[in-house]
Amino acid sequence: MSDNISGIIFNDGETYERYMGVWSRKVGAQFIDWVKFPNSLDFLDVGCGNGAFSVQIDELCSPSSISGIDPSPAQIEFARSRKINVSSSFEVGDSMDLPYQNEKFDVSLMALVIFFVPDPKKGVVEMARVTKSGGILAAYAWDVNSGGLPMEPMHKIMREMGIKYPLPPSTEASEISEMKKLWESIGMTDVETSTFHVERSFKSFEEYWAISSLGPSVIGALNELSSEVVDDIKSKLKETLERDKYNKIVSRAFANAVKGIKTGKFA
Ligand SMILES: C[S@@+](CC[C@H](N)C(=O)[O-])C[C@H]1O[C@@H](n2cnc3c(N)ncnc32)[C@H](O)[C@@H]1O
């Protein structure tokens, strides 16, 4: 199993927490509010990473249990160290080959994961297999192809400078029409979609850079560049980032979400 997906690096739960973990929870709260999970359900968090969303399930959904699975051993180790108040387990594994019996969970979901799965349909069919009839299948993901990633300002500058950076292998799976099509194609019913906009502010450019340059999809690319080129990226970013009336940096992102019910036969 791997901590590195197509050059996007997930090898440090603590670093993830400072950058993507904070972004993740901002969307996660809106997603939970939108799905309206009943209490006392058994949740499967596919691609749980360092457990950033698992903690929100625990805090906001009154679950019976939480199981998490992710290919990155380092992220799973971090997830296991978190305080979760209900029965929980975290293991290393892949969404396309889930090590669970049929119909084990009331809810299976992917938080910021579907675009990393090489064959998203295979992953979602696996999620449906391990979900009970009448259970909920849901996902949300940054709308990569429309500029929804939190690191889009840095990516835009890199594109303009002709610098390559890694993207997840299945970005089209984060488009809202693709999500709906996929859920319906495997027989989910009551399929609904939504888009969530989030923002984060940073007290200075130095704080923004210290946190954002650790993002999983830029850290590897920045490490390959000379310090002159990195300085050039920094000064271009400093000029272009939005500021509020207190001169704080404002950074925005948006994610698409899908939910549906497994009724009877699927896939
Ligand atoms: C952006 S992180 C999201 C983590 C967490 N769900 C959150 O909301 O913060 C994406 C995660 O997807 C995982 N991942 C990548 N490929 C996967 C696959 N084929 N099956 C399951 N998870 C995968 C990565 O290891 C990483 O932890």
Image (cartoon, rainbow, N blue to C red):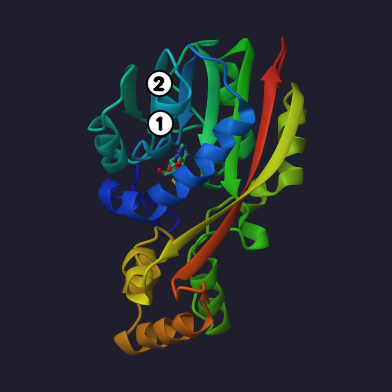
Residue 119: image location, x then y, percent: 59, 40
Q: Answer yes or no: disc 1 within 8 Å of ligand 1.
A: yes
Amino acid type, callout 1? Ser
Judged from the image, the quadrant occupied by ligand 1 is top left
Residue 155: image location, x then y, percent: 52, 71
Residue 265: image location, x then y, percent: 72, 12
Q: Are marks 1 and 2 in contact (CB under 8 Å)?
A: yes
Q: Left or right: where does residue 149 sit relative to residue 79?
A: right
Q: Which mark is residue 66?
A: 2
Instruction: From this view, report whether residue 205 is shown above or below residue 32.
Output: below
* The quadrant where residue 233 appears: bottom left
If you read the primary sequence from the N terminus, does the residue marked by circle 1 or circle 2 appear first?
Answer: 1
Residue 94: image location, x then y, percent: 44, 33
Q: At x 55% / y 61%, what residue is drawn? A: 252
Amino acid type, callout 2? Ile
Task: Name the residue that disc number 1 marks.
Answer: 54
Callout 1: SS:
helix
Measured in 3D between alpha carbons, the distance from the residue under mark 1 to the one under mark 2, in whole angstroms, is 7 Å
* Quarter containing the N terminus: top left
